[in-house]
Structures are given as structure tokens and as C-alpha cells.
Amino acid sequence: MIPYGRQEICEEDIEAVVEVLRSDFLTQGPAVRRFEEALNAATGASHAIAVNSATSALHIACAALGLGPGDTLWTSPVTFVASANCARYCCAEVDFVDIDPSTGNMCPDSLEEKLRRSAVAGCLPKIVVPVHLAGLSCDMVRIGALAREYGFHVIEDASHAIGGRYGNQAVGYCEHSDIAVFSFHPVKIVTTGEGGAALTRDADLARRMDRLRSHGITRDPSEMTQAPDGPWYYQQIELGWNYRMTDIQAALGVAQMKRLDDYVARRNARAERYDSLLSNVPVVRPGRCEDTLSAFHLYVVRVDADRHKTVFEGLRARGIGVNLHYIPVHLQPYYRALGLMPGTFPEAERYYSEAISLPLFPNMTDDEQNSVVAALKAELGG
Ligand SMILES: *Cc1c(COP(=O)(O)O)cnc(C)c1O
């Protein structure tokens, strides 16, 4: 089976992990700080908070922005459930904004229209989470302008998009958002096994997220609400969690980050090769945006809805590990039970009825890619 995604682990990665295992610190040591510095260097953001998953990063991002009961978070229905669940952890409501069919990303026109209606009804969101689907940045200039006009915060779910670019900046720089979140799960661009990070240019948000990832505890006397008893002293000043990344994970991340540009270049080369190999095949290829470099976490084609399931099953039977990103979140039983209705986000549901993620990973061979294309042609021709 050719998988849809696969990590690349080099000897240097293994050596970096072994070095931590032989050192004094498996966690709360120097490797996490080094990984955060690598993330800052790659994105230009001034603060990076490394945690044990992107899900945790989304949670502390929402908590740091003060999301709570009575508030609402909006995200895209075409995403992994974590982009929405972060609101539920904070006891807030979730709603969705339909996608632009050409990219699968949150549609700024739909967002603007929904904001206009919600302003009249007095139910504006506190946070909007645009998701850079497949590694392609959303239209952050427009989303950022709407955030200023309607007074909401923006968390970019950039789980797919580290190494991508938007305009003159790296994704994660947060020019048009408060916080951006990355995932380091093995299928993503860079891996730490499990892991995530929240990036920001806001020092107060960074300090708050730093505390929240470790129980809400501070050792900084300037943050304490009562005088320290002595040099042993720490103070819990709010409720946080243990979302810390280990040094073992961070060392792997530091080693992987050295290959970030190479990974994204190789993914883009594979995507371009798919574009040309599929030019005469009856599928819709991924849309591109001007001045935007996709990190190409995924290469998603759209096929005729009538044949979608048989093509998908046929590809799996031929040993092609295709996948479907994503089942629209509002259709999940958990969200249906909260009152979200099928039919509400028609572009997202149409996307779901047509999308197939083809295998794409940096060390994919030409032969593997040729097999994928041959199998797809055979399925569509038959
Ligand atoms: C993978 C992913 C997440 C969650 O990442 P974890 O690191 O596994 O918690 C969140 N959002 C999106 C869009 C993802 O693809």
C-alpha cells in the first residue's frame, strides 16, 4: 500500500533523539527552547510555545484569548475536528463558515455575510479559526480586515501549512492574526511524533500560553499575585494543564526543521508533477492562489460525486492509500447533537462528496507517483 502520507526520519534525527536520551533532561530541558527558536526563525514570529499536540495548542490559544461560556467560535466545516473542539473545551459554542470551492478554505464572502447577519442578531463570534487546508493559506488580508471591523480574534489553524508562504511572509508570522498553530503529527510537514506549537507576536499572549501549558504556574515574581516565600517558590495563578512537549520530541523537531524548506520544495515538485500527469484526467486539481506558496501537506483532487465512492474504493483495492480530508465537522454526531444541521454548508458537503487525497510525501518516488496516476486513470476510465 502506498500511504497518503509518511514521515522521513534521517540518521541525524535519530542521533539528535539519542543525544537527549543520554543527557540529563528528558523534559523541561534545553531542547524545547531550541525548537521554539527554530520555529521563530522559520516564521519570523517573535514567540513560539511548543506543546504536546496542535489540539493542545488550539486549546491554550482559545483560553489565552479568554474564550468562555456564552462565547462563540467559528471555523471551517472542512477541517479536522480539533479546530472546533478547542471551543468546546472552553465551554463555548461552535459555528461554521462555508468554504470557497476552488481552495476548500473558509470563504471570505461567506464570512462577511455571516458577520453582517450576526451583527444584526447580536451574536458575533469571539474567535474565528481559518484553516489553511492542504497547506494553502486562507485569504488572511480579508479575514484580518473583517476581524478589525467586527472585533473578533483570529487563530490560524496552520496544522498543514508550516513552510508555506502568504504574501511576503512565512505562514506563522501572524501578520493578520493573533495566534497561529502548527501540528507535528507524523503525517504533517515536520514531525516530533506527537506535538504542536502556538506562534504569536504578542508578548502577553505568549506569556499566558506559556503558563497555561504548564498548570497555570509561574516562577516569575513579576507575575505573582502575592510575595514569594523564598527561592523555591512558584505560584499557580490560573488553571492550566500539562501540555508540555518533551525534550525527546523537541530534539527530533530541531533536526527536522533543518529540512523544512527542502520538504516543502519536494512536496511542491510532487504536486506540480501530479498537475501535469493529471492534466488530461477528468478530475479537478487543487486550486492555487496568487502570492501564496502552499506547503502541500495534501494533494486533493475532486471527482464526479456519482463515481466518488467507487473510485475511492477501487484505489484502495489497488493498493493506493487514498484518504478523505475531511468529513465536514458539522455532520459529526457530536455536533449534530448540539443542533448543527446537514445542508447548512452546501459547498463543504459538495467537497466531501467529491474529494480524494492522493498520496503525497517528500520521499515519494516517481514510480510510486506513476502507480497512483495509473490507478486513478484505470478507475476513472472503467
Ligand atoms: C492534524 C490537525 C490538527 C490536530 O493536530 P494534532 O497535533 O494531532 O493535535 C488540527 N487541525 C488540523 C487542520 C489538523 O490537520
Image: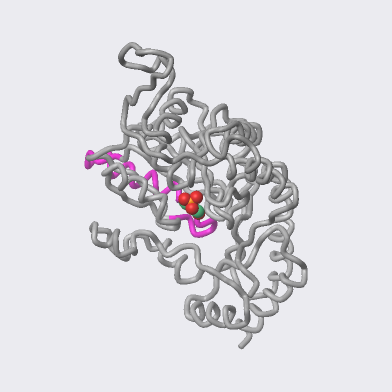
Assess whether residue 369 is covered by the magenta stretch. Answer: no
**In what quadrant of the picture does the N terminus appear?**
bottom right
- Residue placed at 44% from the left, 41% from the top? 243
**Which percent across, then down, holds residue 328?**
40, 62
Question: Horizontally, is 71 left or right of 368 in the view?
Answer: left
Q: Quadrant of residue 361?
A: bottom right
Does residue 175 appear in this view?
yes
Picture layout, residue 33 above or below residue 182:
above
Picture layout, residue 142 above or below residue 366:
above
- Residue placed at 40% from the left, 24% from the top? 218
Per the rendered image, the range of residues in magenta is 99-124
Q: How is the image coloured?
A: one colour
Assess whether residue 119 is covered by the magenta stretch. Answer: yes
Foreground pick, 212 / 45: 212
Does residue 168 appear in this view?
no
Picture layout, residue 233 above or below residue 312:
above
- Residue placed at 36% from the left, 30% from the top? 216
